[in-house]
Amino acid sequence: MVIDHDEGRVIGRVENTWVAKDVDFGTRIRRWWFAACELDECPDWLKRGGGVSWGYHHLSSYTPWGGGPDVMTSALIREISVLSPGVNPAVKLARVAYVKEKPVAVRHHAEPEGEVIYGNGQLIRRYYDNVKITIR
């Protein structure tokens, strides 16, 4: 994951890609490509609706029988870019679908004075004779 196709400005990595099909005005099936990415650095301007672009190496395509633009049949994804404000994607509808913060796992360690804290945050006290228990 880079900014504006500049491979020197890496901000994260692509975790997963998938394709969803959609019917366009009841006549044609469109394929929409999605990518789930994890960002190490999130630019302040990155938000839902911002432009994205996929860098790829073209492998094969064909020209439709009735004419029109070539249809790409295979390619290798090189990188995925988020586009800074003012930079337009080659495909007008290529946009950021959503941005959300990844939940941070909080780890609790058992205290030597008799406290045990489980993963869901519940505090369980174990009672021992003559042991000081600290509640925080």
Image (tube, grey):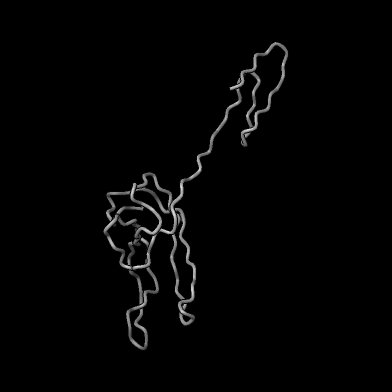
Residue 107 image point, x, y percent? 55, 33
Furthest residue in direction top, as rendered: 130
Query: Which residue occupies the foreground of this view, 111 or 65?
Result: 111
Q: Residue at x 35, y 76 (%)?
A: 61
Q: Residue at x 49, y 81 (%)?
A: 26
Residue 80 image point, x, y percent? 36, 58
Residue 87 image point, x, y percent? 27, 60
Query: Which residue occupies the foreground of this view, 135 or 109?
Result: 135
Q: Residue at x 46, y 49 (%)?
A: 100
Q: Is residue 3 left or right of residue 13?
A: left
- In the rendered view, tell whether residue 120 sits above or below residue 54: above
Residue 4 image point, x, y percent? 28, 56
- In the rendered view, tell whether residue 128 sits above or below residue 81: above
Query: Which residue occupies the foreground of this view, 102 or 75?
Result: 102
Q: Residue at x 57, y 30 (%)?
A: 108
Furthest residue in direction bottom, as rendered: 66
